[in-house]
Image (cartoon, rainbow, N blue to C red):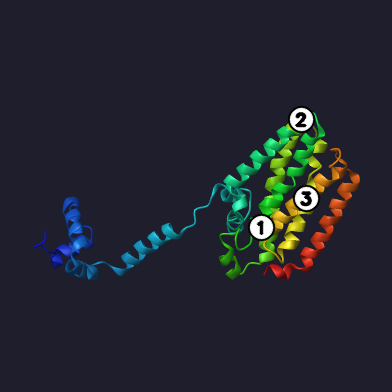
Amino acid sequence: MSTWHMDDDLAVRYAGGDLPATLAASVEAHLLACEPCRSLLAPQVPSARLDRVWDEIADVVDAPVPGPFERLLVAAGLREHTARLLGAASSLRLPWIAASGVALLFAALASGETTRWGLLTYLTLAPIVPVAGVAVAFGRDGDPAHEIGLAAPYSMFRLMLTRAAAVLGVSAALALVTGLLLAGGAWTSAAWLLPALALTSLTLVLSSRYDPRRCGIGVAAAWVALVAAVNLREPGLALFGAAGQAAFLAVTVVSAVLLVVRRKEFS
């Protein structure tokens, strides 16, 4: 093969696909190591064919591969670009959702204890799950598409709210299911909803100025400290009663107003 080279006729036949399979394979192997023969072949290949082949390769290589959650969002009726922006969040991927479900499952199992600490454990942990999810759903460290999002003609405030709503919806569904199955009543499965909204909205407001992950950690730590302080002497559910729920609603409303006022800070 070192002394053999293609001639013009063979180059034309190879470019046109007219060679037998065995001869075509031999020519291809020779072309890999022979620059003069590649130069002889290049003018024989139609440019339109090269462009078509290259476009097909580029489409396959560059085409994004949607994950299971992204495909589910598209099937639910969301536009493809919106589903892709949501699916990029690490807290909306299967490993995170599975980990959240396991954590809630253990908390719900703990609620079956005869003491009030069991139920209090579930009601304390359930609001933290969406806070953690929202904290890693956007921001420079939590969003793998953060730099692209900054350059895209898409409102960062809208993206943040969309992802937060998606994370909150997924977390709420997980907590409601585990609560209804194991927590022992409809009230206990819903008593954490307003605290979750309050903590999540507070995390979003703080994220307009500080790193979202630090905000999530701070809010979660403050929440656990509050529950521990209220129940230091004797565990009870007063924090989740009517007065407590009204306070959580007030925090949610005030945080929502502050979010609107500070929406430009997210850009």
CB of mark 1 within 8 Å of CB of mark 2? no
Say which amino acid is labelled 3. Trp
Callout 1 secondary element: helix
Of pointers 1 and 2, the one earlier in the residue sequence: 2
Left or right? Give the position of 170 relative to 15. right
Q: Which mark is residue 213?
A: 1
Where is the C terminus found, in terms of image quarters?
bottom right
Q: Position of residue 242 (x, y in %)?
A: 90, 45
Say which amino acid is labelled 1. Arg
Residue 136 occupies quadrant: bottom right
Q: Which mark is residue 223?
A: 3
Q: Which mark is residue 106?
A: none
CB of mark 1 within 8 Å of CB of mark 3? no
Q: Nearer the viewer, residue 172 or 122?
A: 122
Q: Is residue 96 above or below residue 266?
A: above
Where is the N terminus found, in terms of image quarters?
bottom left
Residue 122 occupies quadrant: top right
Residue 181 visible to an observer of this rendering: no
Q: Residue at x 63, y 51 (%)?
A: 77
Of pointers 1 and 3, the one earlier in the residue sequence: 1
Q: Residue at x 83, y 46 (%)?
A: 229
Q: Position of residue 207 (x, y in %)?
A: 71, 62
Callout 3 secondary element: helix
